[in-house]
Amino acid sequence: MLVLRSLLYTLGMWLLTPIYAFIAILTFPLPPIWRYQIISGWARSMLWWLRVTCGIRYRIIGQENIPTTPSIILAKHQSAWETLAFQQIFPPQVWVLKRELLWIPFFGWGLAMTSPIAINRSAGREALKQMVAQGKDRLKKGFWVVIFPEGTRMAPGTKGKYHIGGAWLATHTQSNVVPVAHNAGTLWPKNSFLKKPGTITVHIGPAIASAGLKPDELNQRVEAWIESAMTELPASNA
């Protein structure tokens, strides 16, 4: 049954993605926020289809911690699920991502229309400059910025190095940071075709003001909160 339900979800995604990619290209003349509102319909549709086919739902702890002004989200990364769900949970947002993702047919073309912060990860310190310059522009336009400080998806129970980029951007733009923990990887594991039914828990922490903090100090505070919150999340989402 898991195989059949997962297959139905995948087929729906394959059918809908080219359609939304075409719609995304047509939004080019519109203001960035309007483009986002239209294109993010793909993510909301995929979440609905995921619930129907695979039985995956979610609950939120700490929704009252979401600020009213554009902020920087630093979150745990376990699954492809959060790249969809954050678009429904949080206000209009852009993602810091490697520029190569924009070259993927259909998906990348639509992604390019959402005003992402696309950087050359191999550029070292120059990549930080790119991120700050583009980040200031996106925040000014009313977007939130989503960054996964570990840089890649980590299996449940594991922890990667928290890179300083997100904290660097926050301190250089004087933005609040919203730390987020979740356990999506227990239902939709990294690179897994199979998706298990259940309820994912998303824990949103209190915003951390970046004013007066150095990037490494802010990064440590974010890491401490997220990793502590991860220990309190259910080990099973059934």
Image (cartoon, rainbow, N blue to C red):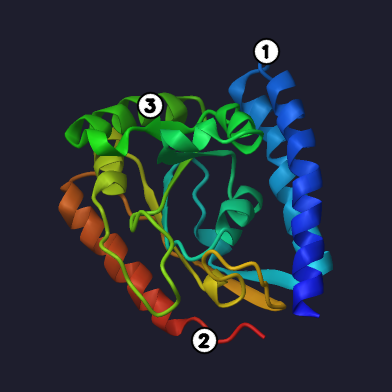
Question: Please, is residue 159 above or below residue 133 in the view?
Answer: below
Residue beneath label 1, please? Answer: 29
Type of the residue with mark 2: Ala
Residue drawn at 75 percent across, 27 percent down:
22
Residue drawn at 30 percent across, 61 percent down:
222
Circle 2: element type: loop
Residue drawn at 60 percent across, 70 percent down:
188
Contact? badges 2 and 3 (CB < 8 Å): no
Circle 1: element type: loop
Give left or right: position of 98 versus 199.
left
Disc 2 or 1, which lies upstream in sequence? 1
Question: Please, is residue 71 above or below residue 188 in the view?
Answer: above
Is residue 213 shown to the viewer in this render? no
Task: Give the CA separation, mark 2 to mark 3.
Answer: 37 Å
The N terminus lies in quadrant = bottom right
Type of the residue with mark 3: Gln
Please tell me in which quadrant of the rendered image residue 229 appears.
Answer: bottom left
- Badge 2: residue crowd in 10 Å (few <14, some 14–19, many ≥20): few
Residue beneath label 2, please? Answer: 235
Task: Give the CA separation, mark 2 to mark 1.
Answer: 46 Å
Give left or right: position of 170 versus 31.
left
Type of the residue with mark 1: Pro
Disc 1 or 3, which lies upstream in sequence? 1
- Badge 1: residue crowd in 10 Å (few <14, some 14–19, many ≥20): few
The picture places residue 75, in percent across and down from the top left corner, at 43, 58
Is residue 177 shown to the viewer in this render? yes
Which label belongs to residue 134?
3
